[in-house]
Every structure is written in structure tokens, then in C-alpha cells.
């Protein structure tokens, strides 16, 4: 199998190396708008090179992985679909809700699969939580706590094009809440604040946020996100039910120091980036995409899934800006 990859930044180079080492993949070819950067990665990893994503597709590939900056996602998905090539794209599939809906409509008209990169669906902890909920082990689920706390903020230049904390960061929580519970979000109430660098507020964004989500079965979700968590990269979920509680992210890497006298848990080492935290999950999702590309598996995370997560992010941004509860019925959908 021959897999093409567009975008050779940090996540793209990592994906190229992962794909190269998969037993189902015979050849990897990389491309980037910066052809010199693509050539450097190709030489370092000893994989193929194409001068542009369009040339890559013209050469013929069995699967197409998109790991460019967000503005390139939607146009490249369209190129992949036009070529009839199974396509993997990092989130988000587009920068706006309207364009995400346009892509969802387009995908519904074709048999070519698109797999969206919400890697938490491939994390063993979240998968175990989903099984516990689906199997009734927890009784009825009444509450969920979910958080994504980055150890340090991204570069200032990233923030104006990121879409904001809810769309860029919490969107992973929105997707995994749907995955674990099998439910949809009915309404949100969100807020945010800035206590760090001025470039967040200058871009109309926040560096810390919180939201209460009500799911369509009445389950309450308390969600938090921050760009400043100096203790380490901290991504967790707790699912609380009438018969039990299960937690994701509670291993020895937990970025918390206990205040209890004599306590030694957690012992570390801690994670300092999302790449460390979800390294096995990233590998698992690309293994799954290889199966999608060869026709052995349906897309495990579709553009429709991405649309629903994006709608929740839109609702949270609207709630934050207007200071009120927002129903998901207010957010356009297909």
C-alpha cells in the first residue's frame, strides 16, 4: 500500500514516521507547500517525496493523510475526494461551521471514506470508559468531568487562526464525550477568562475556559480547559454513575501533587505535551486508517462526527460571548 501525506510539521513528520513503520504500508510519500521542508523530512525518514500535494495525488496513492495547518484541510479533503482516494485529516476538517457542513454534504455524495483525526477514540482508557458505559457497569450515568489542560501555551502567532480555545482544544472533549456516552449535547453554558499572556485577549480568545453541558438524556458534564498547566499536560475524564465511577488519565503520569501527608501517588514521570500523552493512540488511529484505506474498515470517525463536535464548540463560543445558556438547536446542522 502506498500512502501520501501532506504537511510535514511536527504532527505531520510524526505521522510519516508512524506510517512508514506500519506493516500494511509499503511506501510513504510526503509533500508540503514548503517543498524544501518536505524534501528534508523525506530524506531524514527515507521515504518518498512529491513537490506538492496535487503532484502527490497525481502520482497515485492508496491513502491520503492531511496534516497541514487548518486552512489547508478543507481544500485538500476535496482534492482527495476528487481523486477517489481514502483520506485521513487532522481536526478540524474546516475552519468554519459553514464549510464543515459543506464538506459533510459532499462526503454524503461519495463512497470515498474520510477519517477525521480525533485520536482519543483510540486511547485505551477512553475505549474502556465507553465499554463500561455501553455495558451498563456504571448503572445510569448522571455526571461527567472532562478536562484538557495544556502544559504551556502555543506560540502567539498560532492563536488568531486557531479558532479559539473551545474550537481548538475542547473540541477533543466534545468528540470524546459523544463517543463515550453515545449521547448528543442538548445545551451549554460556557465562560472564559485571561490571566496569562495578552495575545489571547488581543485575538479575542481566552486562555482558560469552563462549561456545563447538558446531554440529551439529562447527564451533566463539567468541562474545563487551559493553556497554562505548569504541572504537566493533563487530559482526564471521570464518568460517574449510580453503580460506579470510572476515570481516564489516572495513571502514574497524572500531573497532580497530592496534598495528603505521606501520599506518594502519582509517582511520574509526567507528560509534557499531547504527543507524549497520546503517542499510542496516534499510532492506533493510523493503523485503523490503513485498514480504512484498504477497504477493511469503515471510517471510525466521520466528517459528520466532526460536524457535531464543531457545533458544540460553536455553542460554547456563543454562550461565552453572550453570557447565556445556548441550546444546540440554535446551531445550524444538516
Image: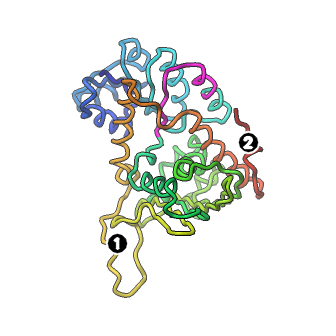
Residue 129 placed where, x, y %? Answer: 46, 57
In the displayed structure, 285 sits above or below 156; it is above
Q: Residues within 10 Å of mark 2 (few under 14, many from 20)?
A: some
In the displayed structure, 280 sits above or below 92; it is below
**Which residue is pictured at 28% across the width and 35% down the height?**
17
Which quarter of the figure has residue 65?
A: top left
Q: Residue furthest bottom?
A: 261
Q: Is residue 115 magenta?
A: yes
**Tag shown at residue 127:** none
Q: Is residue 63 left or right of residue 310?
A: left
Whole-number angstrom distance, CA of label 1 to CA of label 2: 41 Å
Residue range (magenta): 104-117
Q: Nearer the viewer, residue 194 or 256?
A: 256
Q: Is residue 242 magenta?
A: no
Residue 64 placed where, x, y %? Answer: 41, 24
The tag earlier along the polypeptide, 1 or 2, is 1
Q: Which residue is mark 2?
A: 331
Which quarter of the figure has residue 44?
A: top left
Q: Which residue is mark 1?
A: 266
In the displayed structure, 46 sits above or below 229; it is above
Q: Is residue 83 left or right of residue 104?
A: left
Amino acid at each position: 500500500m502506498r500512502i501520501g501525506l501532506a504537511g510535514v510539521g511536527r504532527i505531520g513528520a510524526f505521522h510519516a514516521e508512524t506510517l512508514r513503520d506500519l506493516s500494511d504500508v509499503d511506501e510513504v510519500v510526503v509533500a508540503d507547500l514548503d517543498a524544501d521542508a518536505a524534501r528534508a523530512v523525506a530524506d531524514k525518514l527515507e521515504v518518498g517525496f512529491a513537490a506538492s500535494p496535487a503532484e502527490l495525488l497525481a502520482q497515485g496513492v492508496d491513502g491520503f493523510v492531511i496534516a497541514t495547518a487548518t486552512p489547508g484541510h478543507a481544500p485538500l479533503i476535496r482534492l482527495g475526494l476528487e481523486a477517489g482516494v481514502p483520506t485521513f485529516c487532522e481536526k478540524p476538517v474546516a475552519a468554519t461551521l459553514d464549510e464543515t457542513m459543506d464538506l459533510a454534504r459532499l462526503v454524503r455524495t461519495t463512497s470515498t471514506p474520510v477519517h477525521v483525526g480525533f485520536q482519543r477514540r483510540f486511547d485505551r482508557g477512553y475505549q474502556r470508559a465507553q465499554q463500561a458505559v455501553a455495558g451498563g457497569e456504571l448503572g445510569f450515568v448522571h455526571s461527567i468531568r472532562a478536562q484538557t489542560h495544556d502544559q504551556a501555551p502555543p506560540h502567539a502567532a498560532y492563536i488568531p487562526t486557531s479558532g479559539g480555545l473551545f474550537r481548538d482544544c475542547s473540541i477533543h472533549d466534545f468528540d470524546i464525550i459523544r463517543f463515550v456516552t453515545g449521547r448528543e449535547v442538548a445545551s451549554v453554558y460556557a465562560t472564559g477568562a485571561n490571566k496569562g499572556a495578552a495575545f489571547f485577549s488581543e485575538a479575542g480568545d481566552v486562555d482558560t475556559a469552563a462549561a456545563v453541558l447538558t446531554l440529551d438524556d439529562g447527564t451533566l458534564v463539567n468541562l474545563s480547559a487551559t493553556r497554562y498547566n505548569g504541572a504537566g499536560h493533563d487530559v482526564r475524564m471521570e464518568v460517574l454513575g449510580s453503580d460506579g465511577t470510572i476515570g481516564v488519565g489516572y495513571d502514574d503520569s497524572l500531573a497532580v501533587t497530592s496534598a495528603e501527608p505521606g501520599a506518594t501517588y502519582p509517582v511520574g514521570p509526567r507528560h509534557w505535551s499531547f504527543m507524549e500523552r497520546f503517542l499510542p493512540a496516534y499510532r492506533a488511529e493510523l493503523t485503523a486508517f490503513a485498514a480504512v484505506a484498504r477497504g477493511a474498515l469503515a471510517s471510525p470517525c466521520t466528517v459528520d462526527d466532526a460536524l457535531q463536535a464543531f457545533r458544540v464548540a460553536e455553542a460554547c463560543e456563543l454562550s461565552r460571548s453572550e453570557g447565556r445558556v445556548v441550546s444546540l438547536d440554535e446551531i445550524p446542522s444538516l
